[in-house]
Image (cartoon, rainbow, N blue to C red):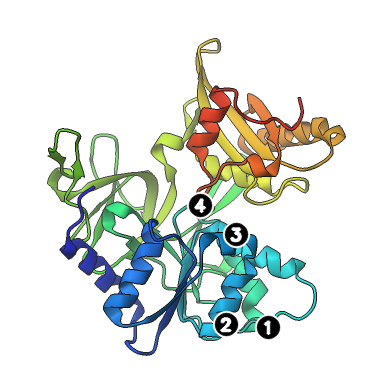
């Protein structure tokens, strides 16, 4: 991927313009690795804007998620960022904490949420948990971005934590009997444009789901090929590989095109199925990965759920049956295989994101450490 100094400067400038960064006043804090675009741009942006940036290692966060908010309290941080799982893990850790926890998030103005699909429940959970410790309800900022645009493509700069029934930036997708809130990722940052197109590249009307494309000064020059040539975005429009729709000028991301579950001609984002399973009592958030694999015998794709659980083996038959029933009821199709593994076996990146491709490869290679058969 080829990014220019101009690409980087534009994107950092657009983020700063959108959030009115104040030189000499604002302070950022990050635990994300420097090789992650979200972590790197936080630090680089701090250097360009003259901000004080506090840094903690990813391992320190994973060992103790509360250290993130404690350090932001200590530094008086105004800006931070992380994937959705980090906000939920931090709220979970606070709920489990015993004794007095000295936390004050009143200085925190912008906490960006991105890098993976955003559940409305996660945004609301973190906000509700820390509201009495100074966190404002408009602090969490759902966003959409990618390395191809340096970092940010869209930012949702209006409150994201109210109930779905009275929150204008949540749209509900129907999946048989299951209603799924989709959180807005906001409008494009200054200078960027986005559109949603069909498979022929024809722009679709607002509210219609399709392929997300972006264009503008932050977008990369192109991908460098093995022979040294460069593949550039056609007409300057980069196809993100994501699906979504636009409503009232704001982007709602549904999921990755290549990860979509296609069942009887219908598209199901794996994240929707994962969240439905994670909501079950014996499982919990971030413990499920759903994907599809070729099935020559059936002549179609089979849908697989890999679930992390540390429950007793005697409970596994019941859990499988409950999961199968829940998915069939909510989405109208049956899982072809439900694999239970120890929670530590769910593959994640160093920043904590679920690794769906790695789980799929392990499944196909029969390299999953199954909790029970």
Instruction: Sort mark 4 into few (<14), some (14-19) or many (20+) by Cα contacts within 10 Å.
Output: few
Tell me the residue at 57%/82% (across/down): 73
In terms of depth relative to the viewer, which is nearer, 198 or 258?
Answer: 258
Within-10-Å neighbours for mark 3: few <14, some 14–19, many 20+:
some
Q: Position of residue 87 (x, y in %)?
A: 58, 64
Q: Secondary structure at mark 4?
A: loop
Residue 52 location, quadrant: bottom left
- The disc placed on residue 350 is 4
Residue topped by disc 1 = 102
Residue 97 against residue 362 in the figure, above or below: below
Instruction: Tell me which corner region of the image, top left, top right, bottom left or bottom right, holds residue 10.
Output: bottom left
Residue 241 drawn above or below residue 298 = below
Q: Evaluate whether residue 215 shows in this view.
A: yes
278 relative position to 164: left or right: right
3D distance between C-alphas at marks 3 and 2 = 18 Å
Between 55 and 257, the one lying in front of the other is 55
Q: Considering the image in quadrants, where does the C terminus appear?
A: top right
Mark 2 and mark 1 residues within 8 Å of each other at the beta carbon: yes
**Residue 74: horizontal and vertical position, in percent?**
56, 84
Q: CA distance from mark 4 to mark 2?
A: 24 Å
- Helix, strand or loop at mark 2: helix
Q: Is 293 positioned to the left or the right of 92 in the image?
A: left
Sooner in the amino-acid sequence: mark 1 or mark 4: 1
Q: Which residue is mark 2?
A: 73
Nearest-to-viewer mark from 1 and 4 = 4
Residue beneath label 3, please?
A: 62
In the image: residue 224, left or right of residue 169: left
Place of residue 259 in the rendered image (x, y in percent of width and height, measured from the top left): 45, 36
């Amino acid at each position: 991927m080829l990014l220019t100094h101009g690409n980087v400067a534009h994107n950092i400038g657009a983020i700063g313009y959108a959030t009115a960064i104040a030189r000499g006043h604002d302070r950022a804090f990050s635990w994300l690795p420097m090789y992650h675009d979200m972590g790197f741009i936080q630090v680089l942006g701090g250097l360009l804007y003259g901000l004080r940036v506090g840094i903690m290692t990813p391992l320190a966060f994973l060992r103790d998620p509360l250290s993130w908010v404690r350090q932001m309290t200590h530094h008086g941080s105004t800006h931070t960022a992380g994937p959705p799982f980090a906000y939920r893990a931090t709220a979970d850790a606070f709920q489990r904490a015993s004794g007095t926890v000295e936390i004050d998030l009143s200085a925190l103005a912008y906490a960006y949420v991105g890098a993976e699909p955003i559940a409305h429940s996660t945004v609301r959970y973190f906000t509700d948990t820390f509201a009495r410790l100074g966190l404002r309800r408009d602090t969490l900022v759902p966003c959409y971005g990618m390395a191809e645009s340096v970092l940010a493509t869209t930012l949702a700069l209006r409150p994201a934590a109210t109930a779905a029934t009275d929150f204008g930036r949540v749209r509900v997708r129907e999946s048989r009997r299951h209603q799924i809130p989709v959180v807005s990722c906001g409008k494009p940052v200054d200078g960027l444009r986005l559109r949603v197109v069909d498979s022929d590249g024809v722009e679709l009307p607002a509210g219609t789901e399709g392929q997300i494309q972006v264009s503008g000064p932050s977008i990369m020059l192109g991908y460098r090929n093995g022979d040294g040539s460069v593949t550039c975005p056609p007409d300057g429009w980069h196809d993100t590989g994501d699906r979504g729709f636009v409503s009232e000028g704001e982007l709602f991301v549904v999921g990755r095109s290549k990860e979509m579950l296609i069942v009887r001609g219908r598209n199901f984002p794996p994240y929707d199925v994962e969240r439905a399973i994670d909501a079950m009592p014996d499982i919990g958030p971030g413990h499920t990965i759903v994907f599809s694999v070729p099935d020559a015998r059936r002549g179609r794709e089979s849908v697989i759920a890999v679930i992390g659980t540390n429950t007793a083996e005697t409970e596994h038959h019941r859990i499988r049956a409950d999961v199968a029933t829940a998915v069939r009821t909510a989405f109208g199709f049956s899982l072809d295989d439900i694999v239970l593994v120890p929670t530590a076996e769910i593959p994640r990146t160093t920043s904590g994101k679920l690794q769906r491709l790695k789980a799929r490869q392990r499944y196909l290679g029969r390299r999953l450490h199954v909790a029970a058969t």
